[in-house]
Structures are given as structure tokens and as C-alpha cells.
Image (cartoon, grey):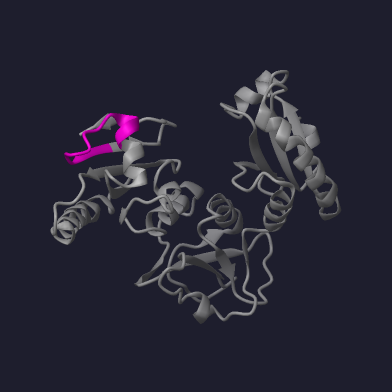
Amino acid sequence: FNTTIEAHELALIAFTAPWCGHCKKLHPEMETAAAELEADGIFLFDVDATKERGLAKRFDVKGFPDLYIYRNDLRTFSRFQGPRHAAGIVNFMRSRKGPACRPLQGMSAAEWLSPKEGEVPRLFAEPAPSAGGSMAGTILPRPVLELAAEALRDMLPCATPAGATVGDDQTFTVRMARPGLPEVTFGALAENVALRRWLMLYSRPPVAELTEQNARQYVGARDSAVGILVLPPPLQGRDGLQQEYYEKELGEVAEAVAPLDGTVTWLVWCRSDTRVGKQLVDDYKLDKNKPSFFIMDFTIRMRIPKGHV
């Protein structure tokens, strides 16, 4: 397996089982996508997890099909989060070709660093001077930057200056621009774990309403924890007052938690009568007519709350 995979710059690996209905639907889509992607130097592989049990255990395969992307330059595997039809697989894998942090095209640095309300935060990696001069923030080696940018590629676009020639030994300083919030510069240890924690911490509001649209940003992120407040349906005519009160309380907690070292922690809230709220009430046997607060800890790959408060 290692020898085959490492012979390719970019690959998609699907763990399947012969009896799996979803796998049977995926196979022809994979074959069509593979034929089109071969010209791009992107290759697709199917692994029968019922025969390759050791590999399935190595990748912690819990269900089928389970798909992973391999990048040779970083020697990394990341879970495939794209569509599972041929056209979607082709477009998604092509978007993964090349570095996660790319030179700006058709936009100035000032425009890139000015995201509008509703847009996602943006990273700007500026090459550090090779000799002399000084720049604010930590100087990061390119591999550290690229590993972190690749891990958060779907939610945090990264760019370098237009026309910049970036070599393997290039170093960078990193800034993050956030809609309606002050720009921040990375200034911690020059290591992958510290950079990823910083990116996760500042790339989304520390307090937010939990919705179907943002649930995956807050719930399940590796090495993070999220405190969830489930509120009862609003009292007649007092929805605004209730929301304002709880947002203020959670905001004060978030300010106290954010500077601490350790686990990245967010605080979110939802109503028990929303779709997300109803699912939480059903999954964790909550009383929909009373406020409930619990913590989900994903630092140890848990799929259920670590504890209730």
C-alpha cells in the first residue's frame, strides 16, 4: 500500500466493503472520475476493507465507504469531504492539486485582507526577508504553514502575495483578516500544533448560534471542545431579551476561556424547537422546556459528550 500510494503526488483512497450498498453506487462514479483525473496526475484507489483489515484499522474506518486524500509532498492523509458523484469528485480533487496557500490572482493584498460581512476569514502569508529587516509575528517555515493550511483548506483560504516565487526553504509571517473584527497576526511557537490551534481559535466567532449551516465548523473539530447551550422555545414577546441575555453571558465566559493554553473551546447556543435543537434533545435526552448546557470534547476522538454540567 505505502509503495503504491507514495508513487503518486495526489490520490484518493476509498475503503469499501462488498456488501455495502453505498459502495456499490460509488464504484462506477469512482471509475468515471478516475478516467478523467488520470491526465491530471491524480489517481483513485479502492481498498476492500474486509480483506485489508490492518489498513482499515490504521485509518480508523468505522463505516463504508470511507474516503481519504493523500498528498505526497506533505505525506498526509485527510478525510475526503467532497461530493460522491463523478463530476463532484473530479472538481474536488482538482481543487486539491497544488499547495493550499497560493499566490493572489486578480486581487490586491489590501482587497484580500478586507473580507466583507458574511465572507469567511482569510489568511495572508507574507514571505519573510531572507536577511536583515524585521517583521511582526512569528517566522514560520513553509512546511509548517502548508500543513496547517491544508488541514483547514475547506474553511480558511490562504494566499501569498501576487507573483511571489515560493521555494521550499521560504519562511513566512501569517495574518488573518476577519469580517468586522480586527486583523490578527500569529505570534506563538513556530510549530504545526500551535499554528493550527491559533487558526481554529480565530477563524470563527467564539460565541455563535448553532445552525445547520455552521454545525460542522463547531462540532467535531479535532483537538477542540464545544460548550452547547440548548434553550427552551422563547416566551411570548421575550425572544429578543432572552437571546441578548444568554449571548452576553456566553460572551463573558468566552473572553475568560480564549486566552488559556490547551484545548480550543467554543460556546454555542440553539433553541430546542429548531432542527439542530430537536436533534440534540433527541440524542441526549434533554428536557426541551428547560435550559441545558453540556460540553462535547473532541480531544480524544469522542462521539458523545464527555460530561454534562
Residue 6 shows in the view = no
Is 17 on the left-hand or right-hand side of 138? right
Which residue is at 41% across, 66% downward? 185
Asked which quadrant contains residue 158, the reply is bottom right
At horizontal 82% and vertical 55% (from top left) the residue drawn is 40
> Which of the 4 quarters of the picture holds residue 118?
bottom left
Q: Quadrant of the C terminus?
A: top left
Is 289 inside the magenta-drawn segment? yes
Q: Write the residue at 67% across / 28% down.
A: 21
Q: Is residue 169 visible?
A: yes
Q: Quadrant of the N terminus?
A: top right
Which of the pair 163/292 is nearer the observer? 292
- Does the magenta-highlighted stretch encompass residue 236? no
| Foreground of the two, 223 or 250 | 250
Q: Position of residue 227 (x, y in %)?
A: 28, 43
Image height of 289 relative to 165, above or below? above
What number of labels is visible?
0
Find the magenta span and give its range. Answer: 281-294
The spot of residue 194 in percent (x, y) is: 44, 50
* Side of 177 where 229 appears, left or right: left
Apparent side of residue 170 relative to residue 216 in the rendered image (left or right): right
Return the x and y of residue 183 as percentages of the image width and height: 39, 71
Q: Position of residue 20 (x, y in %)?
A: 67, 25
Q: Against 109, is 155 above or below?
A: above
